[in-house]
Image (cartoon, rainbow, N blue to C red):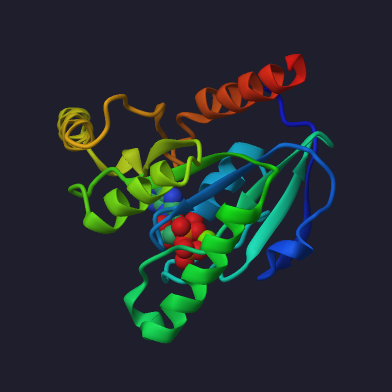
Amino acid sequence: MEISSAEFVISNTDVTKCPEGHLPEFAFIGRSNVGKSSLINMLTGKKNLAMTSQKPGKTQLINHFFINKQWYLVDLPGYGYAQRGKEGRENIGRIIESYIRKREQLTNLFVLIDCRHEPLDIDLSFMEWLGNNGVPFSIIFTKTDKLGKNKLIDNIRNYKEKLMEVWEELPPIFLTSSFSITGRDEVLDYIASIIDDLKKQ
Ligand code: GTP
Ligand code: MG
C-alpha cells in the first residue's frame, strides 16, 4: 500500500470522543518506549507525525491519524511504565482498556515487543487478555536494527515457543526497524489486505 496522505485528527482520553463513522482502525500498543510512535512515523513516511521521545511515557492520549482518507492509525499510550506511579498506571490502563473494549471500529491491534527482550509477563498477560476478549491482534517485534541476525532469529524463536505454551495458533508476526525502515511494506500490505477483505463483506 502506498501512503498518499496522513493527517493528525484528534487526541483524547475519552473513547466516546474518537472520530465518528465506520472506517476501519488499526492501533499500536505495547510497553512504554517500545517504539509505537516511531513506527507510525516510519509507516506513514512522516517523521514528526506522532511525537516520540527517549524517555518512556511520552504518549499519554489516544491519537487518531487519518490515512489515505480511508482508514485510521491510532497511537496509544504505553502500558507498564513504573515511574508513572500506581495511580498514573491505573489511569492509562483504564484509557487503554476502554478504548480496546468499546471501540467498534478497531479492526486490528498491533502489539509491539522490543526484539531484544525475553518474553515478559506484562506482554504475555496483555495478549491473553486480548484473546479472552476476542480482540484480533498481531505482533510486531521492534528495533531489529539493535540485534545481529543470529541473535534476532534466536529471540524470535524463543518468543514463539513461549507463545505456543498458551496459544494453539500464533498470530501474524512482523519484524520492523523504524531506524533502518524495515518491515514497512509487510505491515502496510497486511493492513491493506484486511481492508480489502472488509470491502468484500
Ligand atoms: P511511549 O509513547 O512513551 O509509550 O513510547 P513509544 O512506544 O511511542 O516509543 P517512541 O516511538 O517514542 O520511541 C522510544 C525510543 O526508542 C526513542 O528514543 C526512539 O528513537 C527509539 N526507537 C524507536 N524505534 C526504534 C527503532 O526501530 N530502532 C532503534 N534503534 N530505536 C528506536
Ligand atoms: Mg508514543
- At 71% from the left and 54% from the top, the residue drawn is 64
Q: Position of residue 125 (x, y in %)?
A: 29, 53
Q: Quadrant of residue 199?
A: top right
Q: Nearer the viewer, residue 188 or 166?
A: 166
- At 61% from the left and 28% from the top, the residue drawn is 191
- Above or below residue 158? Residue 72 is below
Q: Nearer the viewer, residue 11 or 43?
A: 11
- At 70% from the left and 43% from the top, the residue drawn is 105
Q: Position of residue 163 (x, y in %)?
A: 23, 36
- At 66% from the left and 51% from the top, the residue drawn is 103
Asked whether the viewer can see residue 52, the reply is: no
Q: How many marks?
A: 0
Q: Residue 50 vs residue 124: left or right?
A: right
**In the rendered view of the protein, which quadrant contains the C terminus?**
top right
Q: Nearer the viewer, residue 137 or 188?
A: 137
- Above or below residue 178? Residue 75 is below
Q: Position of residue 17 (x, y in %)?
A: 78, 64
Q: Quadrant of ligand 1?
A: bottom left
- Above or below residue 76? Residue 1 is above
Q: Residue 79 vs residue 26: left or right?
A: left
Q: Residue furthest top?
A: 200
Q: Position of residue 4 (x, y in %)?
A: 79, 31
Asked whether the viewer can see residue 93, the reply is: yes
Q: Quadrant of residue 152?
A: top left
**In the rendered view of the protein, which quadrant contains the N terminus?**
top right
Q: Residue 168 vs residue 48: left or right?
A: left
